[in-house]
Amino acid sequence: MPDPTPAARSLSLAIDGADSRQVNEAARDFVEKLTFATADEILAMLREILAEDWMALPPWARNLAYRLACLQRPDDPQLLREAAADLLCFGPDWDTFAEDLKRRAEELE
């Protein structure tokens, strides 16, 4: 299975100082690896990368990663809460989605 962690690390580094072509290539590689990763691989990547640098990944990358993990595990209340908490960290744009995730987690328990 594809490990998205190296691609996430490359994306983070590219955003920090590469030209737009390198950023685009890193983003494309990240999305490709993430698309075919399991929920376990996605969560391991998020936890490792964010433990090293909480702002290493841009919000769009975090949102996509959590979204794909939640789609693979729609009945995992812990994951739904974790995704909701991450959404709430980046402004009011995603607050309604975060509240929906928290509500679904409560319903599952």
Image: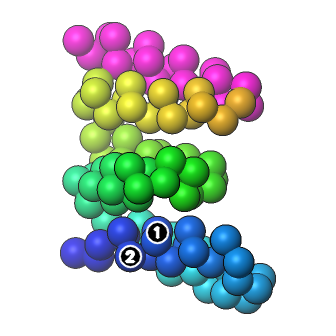
| Range of magenta residues | 92-109
Q: Which residue is disc 2 drawn over? A: 6
Viewer-nearest residue: 80 or 50: 50
Q: Can residue 68 be seen in this view?
A: no
> On the rendered image, what quadrant is the N terminus found in?
bottom left
Q: Residues within 10 Å of mark 1 (few under 14, many from 20)?
A: many
Judged from this view, the residue extending furthest toward the front is 52
From the viewer's perspective, is 38 left or right of 7? left
From the viewer's perspective, is 7 left or right of 36? right
Q: Do the residues labelled 1 and 2 touch (CB within 8 Å)?
A: yes
Q: How crowded is mark 2: few (under 14 residues within 10 Å), some or many (20 or more)?
A: some
From the viewer's perspective, is 73 left or right of 87? left
Q: Which residue is disc 1 drawn over? A: 8
Residue 99 colored magenta? Answer: yes
Question: Where 77 sits versus 34, above or below?
Answer: above
Residue 49 coordinates in the image, percent (x, y):
41, 58
> On the rendered image, what quadrant is the C terminus found in?
top left
Secondary element type, mark 1: helix
Residue 98 coordinates in the image, percent (x, y):
54, 25
Judged from this view, the residue extending furthest toward the right is 20
Q: Residue at x 64, y 23 (%)?
A: 95
